[in-house]
Amino acid sequence: MPPQDIAPGFLALAVLLAGGTVYAVYRLFGSLRRDRFAADTPRARIRSAAQGYVHLEGEAQAPPEGQITAPLSGLPCVWWDYRIERRQRSERNRDEWQVIERATSVAPFTLRDPDGECLVGPVGADVTPTSHETWYGEAPRPACLPGPEGRGCSPDRGYRYTERLICPGAHLTVLGELRSRSRVESIEQEVGKIVVGWKADRAALLARFDRNHDGELDGAEWEAVRAAARQQVEASLGCAQARESVVGQTTHGEPFLIAPLDGQRLVRREKHRAALALAASMVLALLTAWAAQKALLR
């Protein structure tokens, strides 16, 4: 083959390898950053965790609305992600998989530790699933289940299904931003409803709160009415300052991670990923230099 035909090939290879090097370096710094945050952020208990970036560990539980199931397999879970692909023939007469449908769960789920519980909003999180299954079928929706039940679903079929889940009961480490809000607004709404109900029976309301017996409620007496209604609402809630806490995507760029690992194993995983990314970036950089040299020598 003439030399002038070879040089463009090496140049294209050099460009491709350079892109791979940049990606490997990006993954390296991403893993180092996640490792730093995982190692440097102390674990907190949910009940006593401060607002802001936190490291929590606990058991994954169903969301407050109740148990959810995975869209493809129907298995119980607290978070899901799925992809459906269709086999098609490319212009080069090769089989390729085209994504025709994909979706990810956005509903918050519950994280519980021995001291309390909070919600985890998974939108924007780097999620490591507890289950990752791939199986095949002949229709856009699977007719068989993954795992042992779906072994008859041959890879030769026309559709491929991939599903990732976090199962209930999994031990999770969550790194994210904790935001808590008081339920004062909800309490005030309930107080208002109770006061309206009491007003419907004016005689009973006066008998209970008209201290000077003038047939009217003055400002102080109305304050007593609202205080009594608030006390009733708070007693039904079980606490005077009910709060709802949610861990979600960070506002200052810190990594938002959800992983079925304890803190130490998460740190080890990120160190391992960083080491692999470093090795890959070095190899790809050397290959890029070799390909560029070949291209320039031709």
Image (cartoon, rainbow, N blue to C red):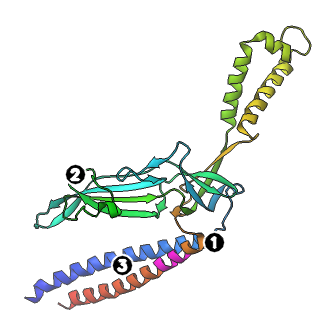
- Whether residue 268 is in magenta: the answer is yes
Mark 3 crowd level (few <14, some 14–19, many ≥20, 10 Å Cα): many
Three-letter code, disc 1: Asp
Depicted 239 relative to depicted 72: above or below: above
Q: Could you say whether the residue bearing mark 2 is in a helix, strand or loop?
A: loop
Magenta-drawn segment = 267-273
- Above or below residue 10? Residue 136 is above
- Residue 21 is labelled as 3
The answer to which of marks 2 and 1 sits earlier in the sequence is 1
User: Would residue 151 appear left or right of 42 to someone viewing this image?
Assistant: left
Q: Amino acid at mark 3?
A: Thr
Q: Residues within 10 Å of mark 2 (few under 14, many from 20)?
A: few
Q: Which residue is mark 2?
A: 139
The relative height of residue 113 versus residue 295 in the rendered view (above or below) is: above
Q: Badge 1 is on which residue?
A: 40
Mark whose residue sits in front, 3 or 2:
2
Report if the CB atoms under discs 1 and 3 are less than 8 Å apart: no
Tell me where residue 223 appears, x and y as whole percent. 82, 24
Quarter that holds the C terminus: bottom left
* 69 and 81: which is toward the camera: 69
